[in-house]
Image (spheres, grey):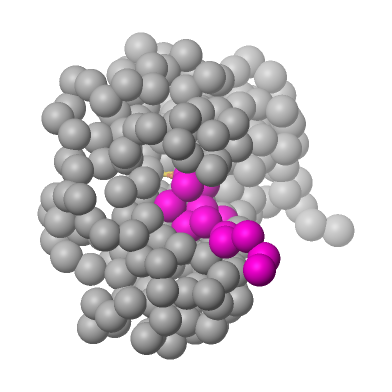
């Protein structure tokens, strides 16, 4: 049996398997920490969305719970003025590049951004950061799904599953800085790339960027 460690989150003592990441240990015990980019099976999460920040005693700055391994005696606070401010900023950054038109989105009501906003009392409004709309065209070339970069929040989940679960690696990050986006090698349409249309990316997209087409 795997060794267990005991730690404290928000004043509650919990046990978790040794080696588990703090995010999953908390969620397993019904303690909510917002998260978007991480997968449980990732050994070294990119921790790119910065939504899962928590305070850990002994750490000077908030840390990403998805990338921190639990330790015996660890004392964690999921909320603090500092954490709340940083999470609010990270959320605003995600929204700045997400075309907010929930009424026209197929994921309306089943969207990670909406859930995080609801659970953390955050506004689904594109402020104070200016919107980063690039008016990139929708890639409608696959037979079974489409990709709308205007809704993509660059969480990287699709990139990770395409490489590590599907073993294909058809998509990756292209461009730099504000022009960073998910694209194919050579920036060709998905149908002309090595994409096999397995649907792995669609199944993990937390927003309405990768969307299955209705069966013909
Ligand atoms: Fe931890 Fe995204 S879930 S940084």
Q: Quadrant of the N terminus?
A: bottom right
Residue sitting at x 26%, y 41% = 97
Quadrant where the C terminus lies?
bottom right
Query: What are the residue bounds of the magenta stretch?
Result: 204-216
Res. 57 in view? no
How many marks do you count on the picture? 0
| Residue plotted at (15% across, 56% down) | 179
Which is nearer the eye, 114 or 9? 114
Asked whether residue 80 appears in the rendered view, the answer is yes
Residue 22 higher or lower than 135, as above or below: above
- Seen in the picture, residue 166 relative to 23 is either above or below; the reply is below
Q: Nearer the viewer, residue 121 or 194?
A: 194
Q: Position of residue 21 (x, y in %)?
A: 58, 48
Quick check: 125 left or right of 131? right
Residue at the image position 63 percent from the left and 43 percent from the top: 24
Give percent across and percent down for residue 211: 52, 56
Q: Quadrant of ligand 1?
A: top left
In the image, residue 122 above or below residue 183: above
Examine the image and state in which quarter residue 98 appears.
top left
């Amino acid at each position: 049996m795997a060794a267990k460690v005991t730690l404290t989150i928000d004043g509650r003592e919990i046990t978790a398997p040794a080696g588990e990441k703090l995010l999953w240990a908390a969620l397993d015990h019904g303690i909510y920490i917002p998260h978007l980019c991480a997968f449980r099976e990732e050994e070294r999460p990119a921790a790119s969305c910065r939504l899962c920040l928590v305070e850990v005693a002994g750490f000077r700055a908030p840390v990403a719970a998805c990338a921190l391994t639990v330790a015996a005696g660890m004392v964690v606070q999921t909320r603090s003025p500092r954490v709340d401010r940083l999470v609010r900023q990270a959320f605003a950054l995600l929204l700045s590049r997400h075309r907010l038109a929930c009424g026209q989105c197929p994921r309306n009501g089943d969207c990670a951004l909406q859930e995080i906003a609801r659970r953390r009392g955050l506004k689904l409004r594109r402020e104070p950061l200016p919107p980063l709309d690039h008016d990139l065209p929708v890639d409608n070339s696959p037979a079974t799904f489409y990709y709308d970069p205007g809704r993509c929040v660059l969480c990287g989940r699709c990139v990770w599953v395409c490489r590590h679960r599907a073993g294909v690696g058809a998509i990756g990050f292209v461009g730099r800085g504000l022009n960073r986006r998910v694209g194919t090698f050579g920036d060709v349409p998905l149908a002309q790339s090595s994409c096999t249309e397995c649907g792995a990316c669609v199944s993990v997209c937390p927003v309405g960027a990768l969307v299955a087409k209705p069966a013909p």
